[in-house]
Amino acid sequence: RQVTSDASFHSVSFSETDHPKVLITGGLGQLGVGLAKLLRKRFGKNNVILSDIRKPPNNVFHSGPFIYSDILDYKNLREIVVNNRITWLVHYSALLSAVGEANVALARSVNITGLHNILDIAAEHGLRLFVPSTIGAFGPSSPRNPTPDMCVQRPRTIYGVSKVHAELMGEYYHHRYGLDFRCLRYPGIISADSMPGGGTTDYAVQIFHDAIKTGKFECNLRPDSRLPMMYIDDCLRATLEVMETPADTLSMRTYNINAMSFTPEELAQELRKQMPELEVTYNIDPVRQAIGKHPFSTNIFVIFLQMSLLCCHLGKKRCLCSKHINKCYIL
Ligand code: AKB
């Protein structure tokens, strides 16, 4: 499979006045359903297609178009883009940091080979392409406080390496073929309705669920591991904003975004203001701890939130309220 000529990439053009027709890959992960909801509100229900290789739960299936798509199957992917006249592609399929270290071959295949399929299809069909990167794309030698958008990136996880690769390949396709590539480096994302899967920052969501269900939480990171985090609504808003930004106003293609940073101990202390009986123990997972030790301790504005405002523990119901958290900004 080869991309034939530079001109062929521009054969289908996206008119700014039309609503985009959006495809979200990896749509059943932590962010896809929320992003689809936001985009459907803006562009119409049928203009946003969620895709994944898993069967969607009924509520997701009935909330708008869902399609099977395997990003490792180039022809399947191309067929979906062509048949649905896709103009924007949000590429969420990826193995996260902890799960990636447990299966490097699979992470390489999904995060790197899958990305190559996405880039070729996006370039060939003139799509606007969003691929998230991560704080994990930095490494121990990256400068901190704050970490600039452009700096040394030498991550030591397959996840981080694959994301640096994605940033560079997207930017290369932009310069070489005019691909409208856009990328934000996400921190750990905190959400109430959707669970993260396989990341180092997952503990910051799991602690709420375990606290409410059992009153106990076993943390697999050290109590003092400070990691950058962001509430999901802020992350989705930033994603929509960067996608809607006119191309000629983007001075770069990859930006850091940030909101807050905290440690497991600080989070537990804030939660105890709501639930004094909460018991937190530490059983360090060496793989997660090694990932969290340096590459993530970056990009920090220590604007610590009042977790008592974040977590409203009302009987059995709880909510995470973004309005109480400082907003995120594209740096
Ligand atoms: C992870 O922990 O791997 C992800 C991330 C910060 O990219 N949540």
Image (spheres, grey):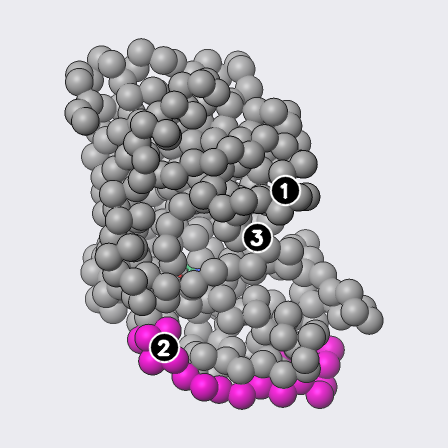
For discs 3 and 1, the disc positioned in front in the rendered view: 1
- Residue type at mark 1 is Val
Residue that badge 1 annotates: 60
CA neighbours of label 3 inside 10 A, class few (<14), some (14 to 19), many (20+):
many
Q: Residue at x 64, y 70 (%)?
A: 209
CA neighbours of label 2 inside 10 A, class few (<14), some (14 to 19), many (20+):
some
Check if residue 279 falls in the magenta segment.
yes
| Vertical comparison of 320 with 116: above or below | below
Which range of residues does the magenta coloring cover? 270-290
Residue that badge 3 annotates: 232
For discs 1 and 2, the disc positioned in front in the rendered view: 1
- Residue type at mark 2 is Gln
First-in-chain label (2 vs 3)? 3
Tell me the SS state at disc 1: helix
Most extreme residue toward the front is 55
The answer to whether residue 14 is left or right of residue 176 is right
Residue that badge 2 annotates: 289
Looking at the rendered image, the quarter that the N terminus falls into is top left
Decide which of 319, 124 is in the foreground and name it.
124
